[in-house]
Amino acid sequence: MEWVRSGEDLFVRIDPDEEIHASLQRLADEVGFDAAAITSGIGRTRDNQYGYMNEQGVYQRRPLDSPSELVSLSGNIARTKQGAAFTHIHCCWSDDDNDVHAGHMFQSTVHVVAEIHIRILSEAIMTRCPLADLELLGLEFS
């Protein structure tokens, strides 16, 4: 992974075999921010796991193992109460038949490259906290 900073903007290149969530969490620790918006992302990934939250508040997961075009990526980076970087990302992929797969990203490994723009929210503190009866960690602001 390499990145460049311009003011509060980061542009990140994630390289083959790197997992996107883990890479962006490492970046948050390296740069030292507590809150950011992930505004865009493109590339080609594999070993993707995505899905949605059902009416009972439980995530339903689906695999997309073969290499696919990462068409769109957005989300945010916050911290847990324990201080760990936490990424919440939604994605859209196109497989080699141009069928679209979209939803909450649980994991995604870069196959060729991922190029991601992040805007640091330097005046904000965002904390991820457990929510009653949901698998999702809620977002609190300070």
Image (tube, helix red, strand yellow):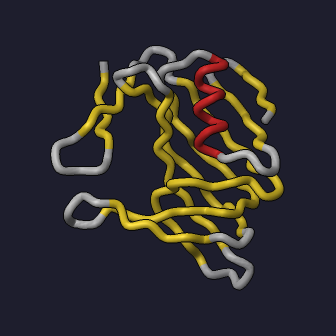
Would you say 89 lies left or right of 109 here?
A: left
Q: Which residue is found at the position 47% from the left and 34% from the top?
A: 86
Would you say 66 lies left or right of 102 here?
A: right
Residue lying at the far left of the rendered structure: 132
Q: Which residue is found at the position 63% from the left and 55% from the top?
A: 108
Say above or below: 101 vs 53.
below
Where residue 44 sits, quadrant-wise, is bottom right
- Report the front residue among 12 and 129: 129
Q: Which residue is found at the position 60% from the left and 21% from the top?
A: 29
Q: Which residue is found at the position 50% from the left and 44% from the top?
A: 75
Where residue 112 sits, quadrant-wise, is bottom right
Say above or below: 97 vs 74.
below
In the picture, the quarter occupied by the N terminus is top right
Give how far across and how far down residue 77 sits, in percent: 49, 33
In the picture, the quarter occupied by the C terminus is top left
Give how far across and how far down residue 52 sits, in percent: 38, 64
Say above or below: 90 vs 2.
below
Q: How many numbered marks, from 0 up? A: 0
Give how far across and how far down residue 85 sits, in percent: 50, 28
Would you say 119 lies left or right of 129 here?
A: right
- Report the front residue among 94 and 24: 24
